[in-house]
Structures are given as structure tokens and as C-alpha cells.
Amino acid sequence: MVISAHALATEAGLEVLRDGGNAVDAAIAVHWALAVVAPWAGNIGGGGFLLFRSSDKAVHSLDFRETAPKASTPDMFATGPDHLEGRARQVGHLACGVPGSVAGMYALRDSLGSLPMERLMRPALDLARIGFELTEADAHDLNAKLELLRSASTRPNAFISRPKWSAGDRLIQPDLYATLERICRNGPSEFYTGQTAELILAEMARGKGVMTKEDLANYKAVWREPIQGEYRGLRIHCMGPPSGGGIILLQVLKTMELLDVAAMGCLKAATVHSMVEAERRAYADRAQYLGDPDRSTIPTDWLLSAGHIAQRMSDINPKKATPSAHISRGIPVKESEQTTHFSIVDGYGNAVSCTTTLNGSYGCGVVVGKAGFVLNNEMADFSSEGIRVDERVGAKDPNRIGPGKRMLSSMTPTIITKNDELYMVLGSPGGTTIPTAVLQTVMNVVDHGQSPTEAVSTGRFHHQWRPDSIRVEPQAIAVADSVELVRMGHTIVCRPPMGRVNLIKVDAHGNLEAGVDPRGDDAAGGF
Ligand code: GLY
């Protein structure tokens, strides 16, 4: 089974499985295909995280997160006319980290894949060359970024080939086709030291970016030890730093395990209050302690220890909200929410959970001239001098910008086992709302007995310590429960839908069930 943000990417993965490929082969094909059919988040100019569980029960995680160029400094976004709004770290060449996706796909193929890269790239190559029809949502998202893509990018490029896009229009990407074809022929060195690297560097020179030849040549994807925890007898496997998502998920689940959540009820005031109070404290820990594990000592084991979680959550009042100002300090980060997640299980029992991103929709808005792909704006995920919204913690901040450093992420690809057998594979886009979307989905299945479809469709809420408000999807929480939450001291803010969780669950007979989030164009397929 494959579930991804686009039916054509899902089909690319399924074809590979039908050809005898494993879940990793399918994941590589889906990732390349998403770079073509979901250019708002699918990418070769961005990065991500992948969690893999093999049929022999070993779990591995790959970090292909972007890195800061060597010339980056903590105050690089602290000056200039746009610094207060943070525009410079969102838009244009300076916002771009060194992309990790191409290195990531080759690291996967070389260690866990079984089919040749030419086979895995074939669907993406065809889709870039022949084109594909935009959905209503695709056209809407592209139109929303047209002005940026016109002003920030080398022209011409495929995205601005029409003044306005409509559902049914065909997006053909000849420059991207040529780039993928060169990568297919020459391998990852094409992207990091070859002609594509030269095009990226020419683009940097045009837009006063700071990424150098050395930055590209030095990029490496990194295999990391996954983190894990328990929830009601299930084993939860997640990505560790530089993603903070897994730690938040495990801390909150450990706290909720002490309560009879099933009896308290789904989206009831007492349940929401307890989850929000745990989230508030977990996100405060994230802001204070998390960053790139290769550059700072990240106390992951301590953060996940029963002792720390019990102490951290010990001042939760079951009847009253704790103001976030009373919780210890750190630097909250505002993250873009346009990421994409896919989940895959193959016939051998291998599973992949992968979240990949450009950060914002269409990243920093720069299409690499003659190469046809969009660059990320992942530098915005660092905390940055000059646009802080909280007290300074200065040089101790583990998510401070530094040369070669990976920026902190919220991506939460997750694999859950029950009695040592595969049980759930899930993840979501949504920036800082990712860990809470995954959390709610897990609890919807485990505590509230919901089917995969119900679990991903149920209304969502989110609290991230700062701002001090519960953000709620329209009508997710009943009026009486909202009134009760306000009485407890919470502030509730209604906001647009959060996350697009794609969940594969294994039922008691070993059959795969799909939970496809209705908030997007996501599509499942299986055989
Ligand atoms: N840029 C979104 C994330 O890394 O979580």
C-alpha cells in the first residue's frame, strides 16, 4: 500500500511494488514523482526525514535535512528593510539551505533499495516530460505563489508559463526533466558537483545567495539512531533530532498514558485540557533544548526519561490552564506548514514513513534557472537574531544559525509496532502542527477506537506553548467543551485545517487499512 499527497505519485510507488521493488524502492520513486507533481512541497531542492522498518524488525532513520551554507551567521537576517517581518529568511536566495533530497535518495537506494535508479526515476521523468493535469488545489496553490515565482526566479520557468492556472491545465517541466535525466545518468555528483551544481551556483550569484561550491560538495545525508517510546503497550518509533517532532510526540503520549483517555472522551474539555497542558510543556522543552545533534549536545535520553517527563508535567492542574509565561523559556519558531508526507508498506512487511519539504509552499520562491526546480526556504526554521519573539538565550540556543548546521524541524515520520509486529505507519505535513496532528491520530485509534479514516478525519486542535492559545479547526470542539476550556483559563483561536495525516494500519488479520486525510488531494492505492 502507498499513500501520498498525489494520486500520480502514489501510482509511481505502486508500479514499483508491482515490479517486485521493496518499500524503499517505492519510497524513492514516490519522492522523485512528488518533486514533479507536487512542486509546492515535493522536491529535489529541499530535504526531509525517512523512517524504515524492515521485515526483520530493524528500524533505521535517514536524515536528509538541509544544512546552513558555510557563510551563514546567527545575525544574517537581523538587518535590512525586511528583517522585522522575517521576509529575508522566507523569500529569495539567502533563505535557502543546502538541499539534501538527492543525497538522501541515493543513500537509500545504495543501502536498502533493490531496483536500479533508472527504474525508480522513470515515472518522475515521464511526468516532467509529458506533464500532468493540475487539480483545483494545485492551481490555487500555484496561483497564490505566481507573483513570487515571477519576481524571485530566473525567467522563463515552467511555473510562470501562464498568467493564471486553472484545474485541468497541464504543467510540463522540460528543465526539470533535463535535470532529472542528468541526475539519472550521472548519479548524485551531478547535483552536488556537476552541471546542476553549476546552475545552482549561477542562480546564487544572480540573487546574492551565499551557498558555495564547497557547501554543495560537502553535503551528506546521515543515518541516525531512531528514538522510541511506549504507549499503552505499543512501541512508537520516531525520528530524533534534528527533528523535534518525535520527542514532543513521545513526551505527550507518556503523559496521557496516566489518564483514562477512553473514558474521558474524544475532544471533550478534560481531554483537550490535559493534552494541551502536556503539549505546552513539551514545546517549551523543544524551544529550549533541541537543535542539530552534530553541533550541540542534545539531551534526548533525559528529555524522554520517565523522571524528566514526570517532573516536567508535575505542575499540570487538571482544572486550570497554566499560562505559558510561567513555563521555562526558549525561542519559539514559526514554521511554514506546506510539507508533504507519504506512508508505504510492501508485501514483504517492510514499512517506510517519510516526510519531505521545501518548508514554505514553493520554498523560497526561487526556481533554479535552466534547472527547473524550486529551492527551499529552510533557513527560516532556525531561530534567528533580530526577529525573536521571546527572551534571548543567546549563544546557548541549540537552534541558532551556524555554518553547516541542520535547522530544527517538526517533521514526525512515525512507525508503531504491537507485540513486535507492524501496526501503524503515519506522519503529516504542517510545520509545528505536525507532532500534534500525529499525536491526535494515534490517540484516536488507540484510545477512541476510531478506524483509520475516522482517525485522520476527526477535527484537530493544537497548542505549542507560544503563542499561548489553543488553535482549533472549525467546529472541531463542541460549544459546551469550548466554554469549559475558556472557563479553565484557555484562549481558543479558530484557524484553517491543520495537517494531512496519511496512515496505514495493519488489522488483526494482517490486512492493510488506509486512512487518507480528507484535507488535501492525498490518495491511497494497494494490491
Ligand atoms: N519546515 C518544516 C519542518 O521542518 O518541520
Image (cartoon, rainbow, N blue to C red):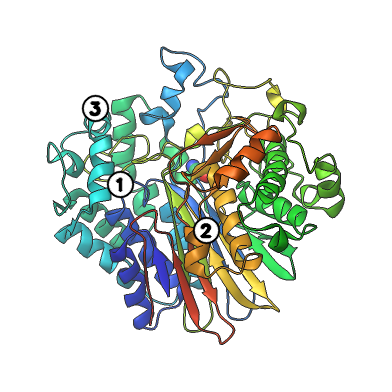
Disc 1 from disc 2: Cα separation? 31 Å
Residue 196 is marked as 1
Q: Secondary structure at mark 3?
A: helix
Q: Amino acid at mark 2?
A: Gly
Q: Nearer the viewer, mark 1 or mark 2?
A: 2
Q: On the rendered image, what quadrant is the N terminus found in?
A: bottom left
Q: Secondary structure at mark 2?
A: loop
Vertical placement of 228 versus 292: above or below?
A: below
Taking the image as shown, residue 350 lies to the left or right of residue 446, namely left
Q: In the displayed orientation, state which residue is furthest to the bottom.
A: 509
Q: Earlier in the sequence, mark 3 or mark 1?
A: 3
Q: Position of residue 404 (x, y in %)?
A: 55, 38
Q: On the rendered image, what quadrant is the C terminus found in?
A: bottom left
Q: Is residue 505 visible?
A: yes
Q: Earlier in the sequence, mark 1 or mark 2?
A: 1
Question: On the image, numbered disc 3 is attached to which residue?
Answer: 151
Q: Residues within 10 Å of mark 1 (few under 14, many from 20)?
A: many
Q: Position of residue 69 (x, y in %)?
A: 49, 34
Q: Residue at x 73, y 40 (%)?
A: 281
Q: Nearer the viewer, mark 3 or mark 2?
A: 2
Question: On the image, numbered disc 2 is attached to which residue?
Answer: 427
Pick the front one: 394 or 473: 473
Vertical placement of 410 versus 524: above or below?
A: above
Q: Position of residue 361 (x, y in %)?
A: 36, 41
